[in-house]
Image (tube, rainbow, N blue to C red):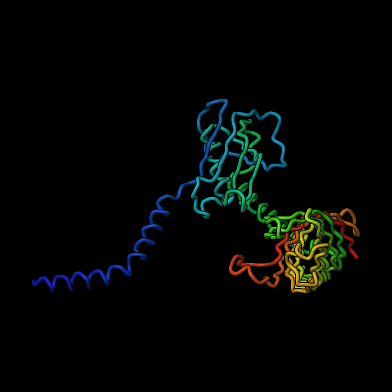
Amino acid sequence: MPREDKEALREKVIRRIVPVIPVISCIAAGALLMSCQTAPIVSADLTEHLPARSADSVMVFRTAEAVPTSARVIGTVKVKDGGLTPTKDCLFPNMLALAIKKTAESGGNAFHIDEHKYPGFHGSTCHRVKGTIYLMPDSLITADTRSALNSLEAYEDDLIQARASKMITDVRDRRLNNPRNVLRIGAGPAWIVSEIETFKALYKSKIGFSLSADYQHLWRSGIGIGVNYLYYGTSFDEGFDIRMHYFGPSIVASVMLGQKWRWASSFGIGYTHYKESATDSRLRVYANDDGSTGRVGTMFKTGFEYMLSKNVGIGLQIDFFVMSLKKPEGLGDKYDFYGIRRIDPQMSIQYYL
């Protein structure tokens, strides 16, 4: 075959293979993941070594049930997630059945459920069972293991429904407990984190003092509207002061994190009055020639509150504020952003109306 034909054939094959490489990779990764799936791990810690029994002879006791005093402890058993256990293999009936099987293999005829951990976001996706293995007189075995398991499954179904009902009730109660009208007053130190350049020095940040007053009106969804006032003031050793007043509307979001704790955030755009007071006009750093200016400012605040009572709460909140200013002549491209960026951490008191 001529060389040109071989090159053309090779390029044709490559064009056909390259698009399917990602698909082949995904299939291979999926196959590898499937091959890595593990079974639940069953472990026992025994104080006695007895002949194995039939699993049908094991009596199961729920957590709240008492084991007969004539029974003696011969060990404990744990059943937990193996790491990549398929969900269908780590449901509660299967995990409990593994614990009962281990009980029978260890020579026990009674198993008491000491702890049952449910799947969760911060733990395993499997049910986990921990219990004690007992040996008691065979005459006290009054229930078949299969019927006991069926009874436990029905009990667990009722328990899960009760947990779900309680969760729904808690969410509803939190919505009802979320205040509809809130008046907040806060104060604390504050920092300008954008550069401030005077004719004598360049400040990377400048601490000052801040005050705030907010009103929020919330609907049952936890979304609402508000009105916000922010004040900031600071003084420079060179002999001038900066004062800023912000006022504007906002959108509010609030969630009750329990019966007492509340999280709230606000975002707003409003009017800002910026003023410099100095004895020497050369000390002015941001404002126009008259030492003051009005600009649009943007603020975002978020924080947590603890409700001391139905009408009063205390909180910790952080306010973020941004305001651009007209760049003075002569600065050129020295600053991509020219204005004020500020962070105001505040302690606050809330009045729930």
Q: Position of residue 197 (x, y in %)?
A: 69, 60
Q: Which image quadrant is residue 335 in?
A: bottom right
| Horizontal arrangement in the rendering, residue 267 relative to residue 13 (left or right) | right
Asked if residue 224 is positioned above or below residue 169 in the image, the reply reads: below
Q: Position of residue 278 (x, y in %)?
A: 82, 62
Q: Which residue is nearer to you in this view: 203 or 251? A: 203
| Horizontal arrangement in the rendering, residue 192 relative to residue 216 (left or right) | left
Q: Which image quadrant is residue 100 in?
A: top right
Q: Looking at the image, which residue is at 75% across and 69% down?
A: 287
Asked if residue 38 is positioned above or below residue 251 in the image, the reply reads: above
Q: Position of residue 325 (x, y in %)?
A: 70, 71
Residue placed furthest toward the left: 1
| Horizontal arrangement in the rendering, residue 229 relative to residue 197 (left or right) | right
Pick the quarter of the image with the C terminus.
bottom right
Asked if residue 70 is positioned above or below residue 217 in the image, the reply reads: above
Q: Is residue 178 visible?
A: no
Q: Is residue 12 visible?
A: yes
Q: Looking at the image, which residue is at 61% across and 53% down?
A: 121
Q: Looking at the image, which residue is at 55% across and 45% down?
A: 97
Q: Position of residue 88 (x, y in %)?
A: 52, 55
Q: Which residue is nearer to you in this view: 268 or 253? A: 268
Q: How many marks?
A: 0
Q: Looking at the image, which residue is at 71% across and 40% down?
A: 65
Q: Which residue is nearer to you in this view: 196 or 208? A: 196
Q: Which residue is nearer to you in this view: 93 or 290? A: 290
Q: Which image quadrant is residue 204 in?
A: bottom right
Pick the quarter of the image with the N terminus.
bottom left
Residue placed furthest toward the top: 48
